[in-house]
Amino acid sequence: AQSVTQPDIHITVSEGASLELRCNYSYGATPYLFWYVQSPGQGLQLLLKYFSGDTLVQGIKGFEAEFKRSQSSFNLRKPSVHWSDAAEYFCAVVVTDSWGKFQFGAGTQVVVTP
Amino acid sequence: DTAVSQTPKYLVTQMGNDKSIKCEQNLGHDTMYWYKQDSKKFLKIMFSYNNKELIINETVPNRFSPKSPDKAHLNLHINSLELGDSAVYFCASSRAGGLTGELFFGEGSRLTVL
């Protein structure tokens, strides 16, 4: 079955430390991959996306993600976390044979401690 | 100028009532969506319209009726509201079903059914 998995429901990280959020997908067709961030009471904002080309993608707010086809993964990273990065993070996938059907992972809540 | 705007932002109503949420996008996109986010933050697609035509209808009760008067607008009407309809409803838009670009989200409409 087609799915998007974010294995970590909740991550706590110290301010200034590095952050990595995991995303795995299970789709037969070519995936287009996205990471979104949702701050409390807000809509979702795109951090970065991968359609093709260089598998290391740079996004906004200092985030990057790497597409690894062999591992069916698209993990999000940030070298040094700021308190304002505390939010919910969603991985999303849409595939070429599933027009318009963006599937979202369950989300990872990131808590940043001083 | 807000790209995807939805109104109202908050609705509080009694079981059995009918309510509507309106959405407008000024991005020139051809595809619009309704997503439901439950209390656990899980995002589930409900409907998708492309050029005013219903493309995706994801096993949503027929008490929910979307209407797209034109490409820039997608409204959601809910009849006979139930407690389980309490959620945040997000409108979103994209180009070409997401195969050439990402989803742009509105800020959400929080529906509380008492």
Image (tube, rainbow, N blue to C red):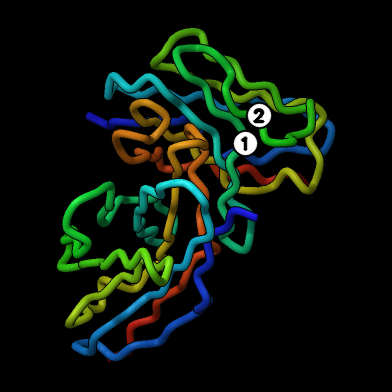
In terms of secondary structure, where does tag 2 sit? strand
Does residue A36 sit above or below B19 in this rendering? below
Counting residues from the N terminus, which is met first, the one under dot 1 or under dot 2?
1
Q: Which residue is mark 1?
A: B46
The amino acid marked with disc number 2 is Asn
In terms of secondary structure, where does tag 1 sit? strand
Of residue B109 and residue A7, the one placed in the foreground of this image is: A7
Of residue B44 and residue B25, the one placed in the foreground of this image is: B44
Of residue B106 and residue A35, the one placed in the foreground of this image is: A35
Does residue A112 sit above or below A50 in this rendering? below
Q: For the point 57% across and 22% down, which residue is it?
A: B55
Which disc is residue B57 wearing?
2
Q: CA distance from mark 1 to mark 2?
A: 6 Å
**Percent position of residue A21, x then y:** 37, 75
Q: Nearer the viewer, mark 1 or mark 2?
A: 2
Q: Which quadrant of the rendered structure holds the N terminus of chain A? A: bottom right
Marks 1/2 in contact by CB < 8 Å: the verdict is yes
Which disc is residue B4 wearing?
none
Q: For the point 66% across and 41% down, which residue is it?
A: B12
**Percent position of residue B42, x then y:** 58, 57
Q: For the point 40% across and 49% down, which residue is it?
A: A31
Does residue B50 sit above or below B102 in this rendering? above
Q: Residues within 10 Å of mark 1 (few under 14, many from 20)?
A: many
Of residue B83 and residue A104, the one placed in the foreground of this image is: A104
The amino acid marked with disc number 1 is Met
Q: For the point 49% across and 80% down, which residue is it?
A: A10
